[in-house]
Image (cartoon, rainbow, N blue to C red):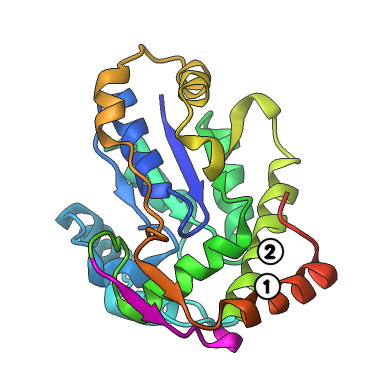
Amino acid sequence: MKVLVIANERSGGISLTRMISKMLNSTWIDDIIVHLQHAKYSTYPNWILEWYEENSINFNDHLKYFSKVTDAYERICVNYTKLLDYIYNKIPLVKITTDNTFLELHEIIDYCQKNNIKIIYLYRKDEFSRALSKCVADNTGNYGIKDQKIDITIDVSQFIYETILNKKLHKNIMKILQTIDKNNYKIITYEELYDNKQIDQIYDFLNTEKNNEEVNKILYKTNYNSDYITIINRTELEEQYKNISDEFGYVE
């Protein structure tokens, strides 16, 4: 069994992937495909770096290109078929996030369809809270605030950018998934991720033996704890979100 997890940022993707790794009794690679700006937070195995060397791609250049929003044609070309072949020959589980181009997503999802790789797409219905969580994390550098009080004013333009971008990314993913066999993918929301019924459905989808005790040990919410965060300009952001949603629609 081979699996690709596609997750919105700040939607519980790490928890879900860790959970699936327990279900598959496997290791996994986080965000190595297209979301390389997190490379500064992660240590990739040598065998990944060797692939870049063998294919004459400078890993640092690749990281540089993916650390900012760029036009697709400016990106260093990576043959995702070759890269995915290489990774899936070593491990059964890969997680990526959705902040990449439509063509990249299409290529990766097509690869999974052709190679019978199960896809799980995770997103968060409460887009307002997701965008707040992303902005807080980016501004504080803390992606798991649990034990400190923080008062923060979020830049309105950053919030608007995060919200509109994610709405478009979500629509792209849904549009691509509708082109493949429904038996090959499952869509999960953050809001239902921690429900035992949903966990059982994931087991059924992957057709793996249940091990709820191990899975429950690693299930924890990855968004910030609202008890510790005060958004000083929350009212202003709520009004901006309403205007954005009226124009771009709500995430459903």
Mark 1: secondary structure: helix
Indicate whether 207 appears above or below 137: above
Indicate whether 30 appears above or below 78: above
Instruction: State the image coordinates of residue 244 (x, y, percent, origin top left).
Output: 76, 74
Mark 2, Cα crowd under 10 Å, few <14 / some 14-19 / many 20+, is some
Instruction: State the image coordinates of residue 237 (x, y, percent, origin top left).
Output: 63, 78
Residues under labels 1 and 2: Cα distance?
5 Å
Instruction: State the image coordinates of residue 41 (x, y, percent, origin top left).
Output: 24, 67
The residue pinned by badge 2 equals 167
Q: Residue at x 69, y 29 (%)?
A: 181
Query: Answer yes or no: do the residues labelled 1 and 2 have beta carbons within 8 Å?
Result: yes
Q: Residue at x 50, y 77 (%)?
A: 75
Residue 160 in view (yes/no):
no
Q: Label 1 amino acid?
A: Ile
Q: Nearer the viewer, residue 197 or 119?
A: 197
Q: Label 2 amino acid?
A: Lys
Mark 2: secondary structure: helix
The residue pinned by badge 1 equals 164
Q: What residue occupies the far right of the structure in this picture?
A: 247
Q: Quadrant of residue 147?
A: bottom left
Magenta span: 148-158
